[in-house]
Each structure stands twice: as structure tokens, then as C-alpha cells.
Amino acid sequence: MMAYERSRRSFLRMGCVAAGTAALVARSEGANAGGEGGDLLAYVGTFSSPLRDVLPTQVDLPPGNGRGIHLFRVDRKTGAMTPAGLFEMGTSPSHLAVNANGTRLYSANETDRIDEANQGTVSAFAINPADGQLTLLSTVPSGGAGPTYVSIHPSGRFLLVANYFGGSVAVVPILADGQLGEATEVKVDEGEIGPTRATHAPPGSFAISGHDRTHAHMIEADPSGRFVLHVDLGLDQIFVWEFDDQTGTLKPSESPVVSLPPGDGPRHFHFHPNGRWFYSIQEEGSTIVLFDYDSETGRLSSRQTVSSLPPGYAGSNFCSEILVSQDGTHVYAGNRLHDSIGIFEIGQDGTLTMVGNEWTRGNYPRSFGFDPTGNFLYCCNQRADHVTVFRVNRDSGGLEFTGQYVPVGNPSCILFLDLARVKPAS
């Protein structure tokens, strides 16, 4: 692995999001409507365990600065976050997902182990409906090394997992009590690894990332749940699977693979609320690609490519998160090293126009998420060890920094839970 990638992956325990996500993150699986009664909570996933250099001779590094899953109460009017709890973990819960009822939380427990005999893990937690505190229910193998992303299938009966270092994706059943079962499907990515130099790299870029092997970075179902999509950064491809929600298995769709420009490195994606537009962000190419999505066949057709960076930028940048606003009017794109969030207006045909670029007030924004109202955006600045809070201008899409810094060691993702909306398990 090249020296730049070693630095990027090991410095302060970088892993996701990302999120993706992140995701995210704002994709809090049903806890998206605001309420006046009950606490609004935020869960922040972190890098809490070391990510060693992935080399023949591995060198132990100190633990990450995070301590596990951090819990906060959120002021609905000001966006302020107050610490409310911590579930300490020896691995890195770098990505989180909450079920539709708000009763269960799931985590991807990331490490850098690439020996296929050393599987990564995912965990299930029960959420206390009174205060949001977590109780561990189960931990099971993730189907590969370095799980970096989890999402819940719309049926609520399966956890979808992307294993970054394993180059694989898995389907893990969610049992009746919320615990996790043994994977019903594992797919290992195969193909030709893309070049280390991205097709769309900014001038002077040394943004060399995951083109050493296959790297599954995100997995999520389409809105209907009929298809499941995942990206592989090392292959520069998006995979589209038909999903059997009775058996929890995947089979290639009619158009099973979409290729991005060589070396650009697809990382995360997000559907527009209309379900017809699909936005993919490329980690090394610093681009956003708009695809038209055919929900009947799962086919993706690219239509527009734009830079995530302001005009004239030169040097290195790694993209991270991408989110569509809940009202479908704007796209937000994370830039690490440039340390900004690009803001794009969505036209009537889904095409993007950059309208702004906001400094994150921190270092290496791995992911970000909206509160349930969409009035605040919270940015996880991984290397700055804090979350920053921005007020969203719903008309222009602009972000206004509130002045609030929330200290969290190596934050990697954030998602929200409105306790007023929790439906206790029957």
C-alpha cells in the first residue's frame, strides 16, 4: 500500500462514510419526523480501536480517540448537544443504523484485519425508550474484514453490511427480538482493480486511496426494497442486486454493474426522495454523478458529472459523505482535506448547480447528518475530534455555523432518534 494511503488510513484511525456513511447518519431508518414531546437524541459512532498499517509487518498503533457509541440529548430549537451516555466498545462502531420503530440500533465494528479468517463483526443493541441508553443484544460475523457500513432493508428483517477490507457485502437476518442471526448471503467483489490516479483528480492531487484491492464501501436498498445497491471503491463500480426478502439472498439484476471513470473511486450514494434520481460521490475523483434510476429494472443511467470542489481548486482531496435534503431541493457533498461541504441546488430535471461551499470548522469531515426537522446539519470532523453544528437555510440551502463545537474523539457518523416517535417492541 502506498505511503499516502497508509497515512490516510492510519492517522487518527481513519476507516468509512464513511459513512457513508455516515449514514448515515441522516438515514436514521424512520426516525425522521420531528416531535414536540420526548427527548431528541443523537448517537455518534467513533473510531475507538487502532487501525494498523495494512502491511506484511503490521505495527500496533494506540487506540482511536473515540470510546464507543456516544449518546447526546439535542435541543430542538438551538441544535445544542448535551452528553447523555456512552456505550464503550473495544472495536470501532464506525457506522450505525436504527430500525423504523426506534427500538434497536446496529453497528459496524470496524478494524483493519484483512486476513479472511479474521471476520469483522456487527452488533445489535436494544434502545431504552425512556432515555435512549443501549444494551448489547448480540454480536455476529459481518461476512468479511473491516465492516464499514450498515443499513436496514425496508422490510426491517435484514441488516445489509459492506466490508471494506474484505471487499465483500453480506445480508444478516434480524430476528424477531432484534438480535442478529447468521448471514444468509455473502458476495465477494471480483474484477480488475482501477488505477491509483483518478480520471477526474484535481490538478496536483495525491489523493491515492483504495485502489490496492477490492473495497466495498456502502450498501443500501432502493426505496422499494426490491433492489440492493453497493459500491466498490477499488473496482470503480456500482453493483445492483435483486433482493429476495423471503430468503435474504442476492442475485444480479438485469443491469448488474455500472462502471465509474477509472480511479475515481465511488464511495457513497443517496437517492432523491422521488426515487428516480441517484447521486454517487467519488472519493478520489472529487465528483458527483447523477444517475437516472429505473425502479422496475434497477438500471442506472448516468446523466451529469460535477466537481464537489469550488472552481480553481488544486491539490489533494478525498470526498466523503453525500446527502440529499429531505425536501429534495439540495445535495450536500463532503470534502476531506479541503474540509468543506459543497452545496448544490437540484434543478427540475435533477441536475446539480453549485451554490455554495461551507468550511466545516474542523479537520477531515468524514460524514454529516440532518436532524429530523432538516433545520440543522451536524458534521463529524474526524481528525479534529469534534462535531460542528450548522443551521440550514431551507430556501437557499446555505449553512450557517452556530458556533457550537461538540467534543467527540474521532467521530465517524451521527444519527438521530426522536423518543416521541418510538414504538415500544410488542
Image (cartoon, rainbow, N blue to C red):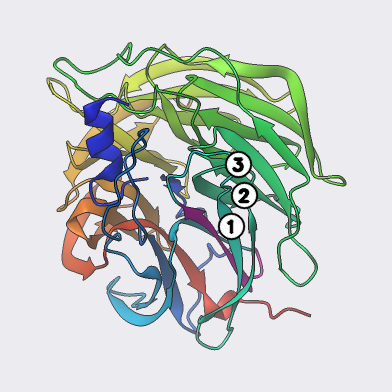
Sequence-first disc among 2 and 3: 2
Q: Nearer the viewer, mark 2 or mark 3?
A: 2
Placement of the N terminus among the 4 image quadrants: top left
According to the image, label 3 marks what residue? Answer: 220
User: What kind of element bears circle 3?
Assistant: strand
Magenta range is 100-110
Q: Position of residue 217 (x, y in %)?
A: 49, 36
> On the rendered structure, is 132 left or right of 308?
right
Name above or below for residue 11 compared with residue 392. above
Q: Given contact means CB atoms under 8 Å apart, are the residues at marks 2 and 1 in contact?
A: yes
Give whichever of 216, 151 is nearer the camera: 216
Percent across and percent down for residue 227 are 72, 34
**Which quarter of the picture shows residue 287?**
top left
* Amino acid type indicated by mark 1: Val
Q: Does residue 273 appear anywhere in the picture?
A: no
- Residue 59, position as x, y percentages in the image: 29, 45
Other-residue count near label 2 (Cα within 10 Å), few / some / many at <14 / 14–19 / ≥20: many
As drawn, the label of residue 122 is: 1
Give the residue type that dot 2 points to.
Answer: Ser
Q: How many marks can you see? A: 3
**Residue at mark 2:** 142
* Residue displayed at 74% across by 49% down: 183
Q: Quadrant of residue 247?
A: top right
In front: mark 1 or mark 3? 1
